[in-house]
Image (cartoon, helix red, strand yellow):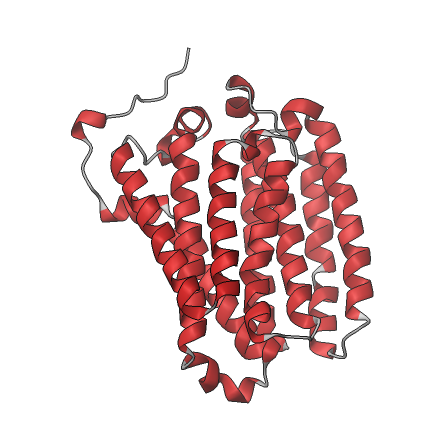
Amino acid sequence: MSTAPAPVTAETRFSIPGVLKLVRWPNLLMIAVSQYLAAIFLLGPAANYGRYLKDLNLLLICVGTVSIAAAGYIINDYYDVKIDYINKPERVIVGNILKRRVAMFIHIGLNLIGLICGALVSLKIASINLLAATWLWGYSNQLKRMPLIGNFSVAILSALAIAIVGIHYGAADNLIYIYAIFAFVVSLIREIVKDLEDLKGDETFGCKTLPVVWGIRPTKSLIFVLMFLFALLLINMLKEIDNNNIYLYFAAMFLPAVYFIYRLWIADTRKHFHQLSTYLKLFMASGILSMILA
């Protein structure tokens, strides 16, 4: 019988720290930084950074993307309260620190901000923001409980957060899209690892994630295959650009990638998979910061 604490709905109060924790503010900061770094260093030349810092459209794109991502985190936790009480009871915000209706109100408000920001930039950006907001709701409501589809959904939206900058400025350079693919693959692998971490709760509530449907070992094998395919794709794309700094960065990532493969191979507990998930988050952050090398 589960010993997870029950929601304290009667005592719930609005909490700014609770909201910040709910929307995963470090992840939102990473999104904002990645978009500005992509504009300044990948679209360049970097000497013209003032152009992007003063560009109201880029600010609106950033605020819109961050708002929709924050709304996505809220609706995800809103639907996953019961599962989270099994997988991570100490991190449950909705229904415990924040009332469910308050969480939903904030979710709707953030989505509206994101859509308005997109509309102020262009019809194209507004359409992308609408697609992202709808997709995140569908992911939280149903898609995440389906094998691979939910994982691909998050990965595509992660790539889109970078690609949208290139789309807005009409970038023809492959470099920004290489980083979008990098974000896609790392996010995809991390989402699968998180499914391994959350296996107990997902299995209890009938979620058909890959580890539930396939088992742990075949899911690990898929991650190894994805990493191999990504390496081949990356090598082919890097051939199309002339940037020694980027070559060196991705070459330096070989050893951390091998270390990850080793750790994944021996991982067999929830704690191990949580550590690997955190490792991949740091891996992603290093990739974002490497845009400076461009």
Residue 165 location, x and y as percent? 55, 69
> Which one is in front, 204 or 207?
207
Q: Is 281 rendered above or below residue 212?
A: below
Q: Residue at x 47, y 80 (%)?
A: 52
Q: Residue at x 39, y 57 (%)?
A: 114
Quadrant location of residue 254?
A: bottom right
Residue 8 relative to residue 151: left or right? left
Quarter of the picture containing the C terminus is: bottom right
Question: In this view, which residue lies farthest toward the top?
Answer: 1
Q: Residue at x 78, y 56 (%)?
A: 231
Q: Is 207 rendered above or below residue 98?
A: above
Q: Residue at x 33, y 45 (%)?
A: 108
> Which one is in front, 181 or 269?
181
Residue 188 location, x and y as percent? 64, 46
Residue 189 location, x and y as percent? 65, 44
Count numbered badges in the picture: 0
Residue 28 location, x and y as percent? 43, 56
> Which one is in front, 291 or 139?
139
Residue 111 relative to residue 230: left or right? left
Residue 113 relative to residue 170: left or right? left
Q: Is residue 12 visible?
A: yes
